[in-house]
Amino acid sequence: MALRIDKTSILSHRLDHNGYLRVDAYATRAGVFVYQHADGSVTRELRHPDEVFKNDSIDTLVSRPVVDGHPRTGMVTAKNTKHLIVGWSGERIDRAEEDHAKVSLLITDEAAISNVSDGKKVELSCGYQADIVAEDGEYNEEKYDHVQKNIVYNHIALVERGRAGRKARVYLDSDESGISQDMDTEIERAKPESESVTMKTVKLKRDGVQTKNFKMDAQNIEIEESQEPVVASVLTHLDSAVETIQKLEKDFENLQGKYDGLKEKADQAISPERLDELARERADLCGVAAYLGMDKFDSLTNPDLKKAIVEKANPELKLDEKSADYVEGRYESVVEKIRQDNKGLESLATLKKVTQPEPGKDDKTTTGREDEEAKSPREKLNEDLSTMWQGGGQAA
């Protein structure tokens, strides 16, 4: 079947309560049509009333999509109708004077309504298929060389005055000297459905985004107007994804820092020898603290315990603003005095043992030299220290 278009005029139009445009128009007619083909040839084709108003044919004009200009592919299909449709034809087709087919249209697209109301597009052009049979004859005193049969309508297009669609721009009158309003044309053979059709476009400005491992430059995007909501939704999800990526990158950096710190500690793991040294140091501190009669010192760190020992041995001494080296020096003095008082002491850690009184000894029943001998090393140290730090004690 060949593809054809013909052209008629809009009779009247009015807006309904929804703002839609209702149009009464002649959609098509019977008669002899002159067609200009792509190769330059011309045929005169008869559209006989018996074919135009045949039920099988006229029924295909009911509820046809109305489009703004003929589609580039020639046909309106389920694949492109959402991009093209601006309205619908009604369900009633009347046979009017001079064998015109009268139809009512409902146009719902704002731009198309404006084009009709402003007089920019006030003519209709049907797109249809028909079997073209070579046959010479005369109809109403007009000669023809072909006859159209089995007419099947595809769409109704709104077109500009004096034109019958994108491919209908060359018209000839009977003497080939001007433009004939009766001239129609053959629609270009349908191209693959994948070919894009002309439609409204919008431009979107997309700011650039960058994360540590991802970068996208700013872009100006031109898309079909109907696709704007979909693209906008995709861009919104992209923004959300970028925020998530940035957060994950920060979390990763924090974890990487913790990992590097733990790895550094692992690389500097304490050797068994160092552990033994630390254990001996702690045991010595605890022995000295016990020897001085201190209690509840287990929770103190080594530096704090040394400070507490020095203050215990020197009640009047305040170390709040003293340096660690100063505290260390005073601590060594205390330890040295303890060693002098405990000849043969193997380890400061064993001082805990000498802080206990010998069995059978009772300090309350001894006097004089016996009292002196009965004193524990801790008691002797306390007595000595109480005068030594004032400069009046005896040398050990």
Image (cartoon, grey):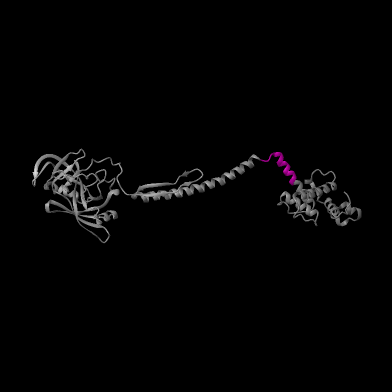
Q: Count all numbered tags in the image, as a single digit.
A: 0
Q: Is residue 360 visible?
A: no
Tell me the quarter of the image containing the N terminus.
top left
**Quarter of the image holding residue 255?**
top right
Queried whether the magenta region covers residue 254, the answer comes back as no
Q: Which residues are magenta?
A: 269-282
Queried whether the magenta region covers residue 274, the answer comes back as yes
Q: Position of residue 98 (x, y in %)?
A: 12, 52
**Quarter of the image holding residue 131?**
top left
Q: Nearer the viewer, residue 294 or 178?
A: 178
Decide whether the magenta segment is chiefly helix, strand or loop.
Answer: helix
> Which residue, as the protein is rendered here, is positioned at the far bottom?
17
> Which residue, as the protein is rendered here, is positioned at the far top?
39
Instruction: Give me the residue at 78% from left, 54% from top.
Output: 311
Instruction: Give me the residue at 78% from left, 52% from top.
Output: 310
Q: Position of residue 269 (x, y in %)?
A: 66, 40
Horizontal relation, residue 234 to residue 44: left or right:
right
Q: Nearer the viewer, residue 375 or 152?
A: 152
